[in-house]
Image: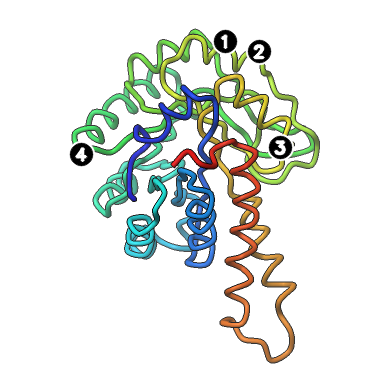
Amino acid sequence: MLVNLNEVLPKAKKEGYAVGLFNTVNLEMAKGVLAAAAELNAPVIIGTAEVLLPFASLGELAPMLIPLARDCPAPVVLHFDHGLTLPKIREAMDLGFTSVMYDCSALPYEENCEAVRKLTEEAHSRGVTVEAELGHVGSAGPDAGDGSVYTDPKEALDYSTRTGVDALAVAIGTAHGAYTAAPKLDIPRLREIAGLVEAPLVLHGGSGLSDEDFQSCIQSGVAKVNIFTDINCAAAQAAHDGWAPGEGMTGLMGGIVESVKAATIRKMRVFGCQGKG
């Protein structure tokens, strides 16, 4: 069933588990993620990000993902992640995405607040939920979290109050992409933010963290975790392992779906969302 963030994240926050966002750029990845949600009766968030649009456009993805989400027995949020430009965010809403992220984290604080506040009012008038980011989650490098600007707890309270966002992504030491060194997570900072902010908190840069890292973050207030690298690599590995001379794409598709499903199930069990649909 197709829902928005407000139909899955407040419950996750209250009951102490997290819902995964698994970005999907083709049919096999989407089918694998949704098969995992159906098998575990777990709420799930699928979608894409603006940086991934060169691989599949919003216009190509929406007609595929919306029927799949509606047919899934578990709750499914269709989310546009890391939207950077208003035209693309509005296109996602026009096409039927039920949730969007407006990433203004690179802007000065006041500009970030005002831009996100205006977009949140617009989105809410259309029944679409909004996620934003305060602080900045950088890219993985020799020091995990390279380029990150950690979220200030008092600013997080002010920001969430002024913008009215439905979910807030915070920077506590994670990084986007594959880690080359173990991240140093600031769990005390996360706990302080969670104690001040009513909106459910989001952890970006989730791929590559240990199970213990995830569980510590969830116990400290995270209700949504973003995953892409793990299932993207699982899909590629399945294609590699399944190929043989003379083998066509149709011979690989089933293995890709199953590999993505298995990787998604593993994360869902770590997040504790099984049976929460």
| C-alpha distance separating marks 4 and 2 | 36 Å
Instruction: Name the amino acid, label 4.
Output: Arg
Residue at image point 59% right, 73% down = 254
Element type at mark 2: helix
Contact between marks 4 and 1 (CB within 8 A): the answer is: no
Residue at image point 41% right, 26% down = 10
Residue at image point 64% right, 57% down = 262
Mark 4 highlights which residue? Answer: 126
Label 4 crowd (10 A; few <14 / some 14-19 / many >=20): few
Q: Earlier in the sequence, mark 4 or mark 1?
A: 4
Q: Is residue 34 above or below residue 122?
A: below
Q: Earlier in the sequence, mark 4 or mark 3?
A: 4
**The furthest residue to the left:** 125
Q: Earlier in the sequence, mark 3 or mark 1?
A: 1
Label annotation for residue 192: 1
Instruction: Name the amino acid, label 1.
Output: Glu
**Lateral position of residue 110 relative to residue 184, left or right:** left
| C-alpha distance separating marks 3 and 2 | 17 Å
Label annotation for residue 46: none
Mark 3 highlights which residue? Answer: 209
Contact between marks 1 and 2 (CB within 8 A): the answer is: yes
Instruction: Name the amino acid, label 3.
Output: Leu
Q: Is residue 182 above or below residue 245?
A: above
Contact between marks 3 and 2 (CB within 8 A): the answer is: no
Mark 2 highlights which residue? Answer: 188
| C-alpha distance separating marks 3 and 1 | 21 Å
| C-alpha distance separating marks 4 and 1 | 32 Å
| C-alpha distance separating marks 1 and 2 | 6 Å
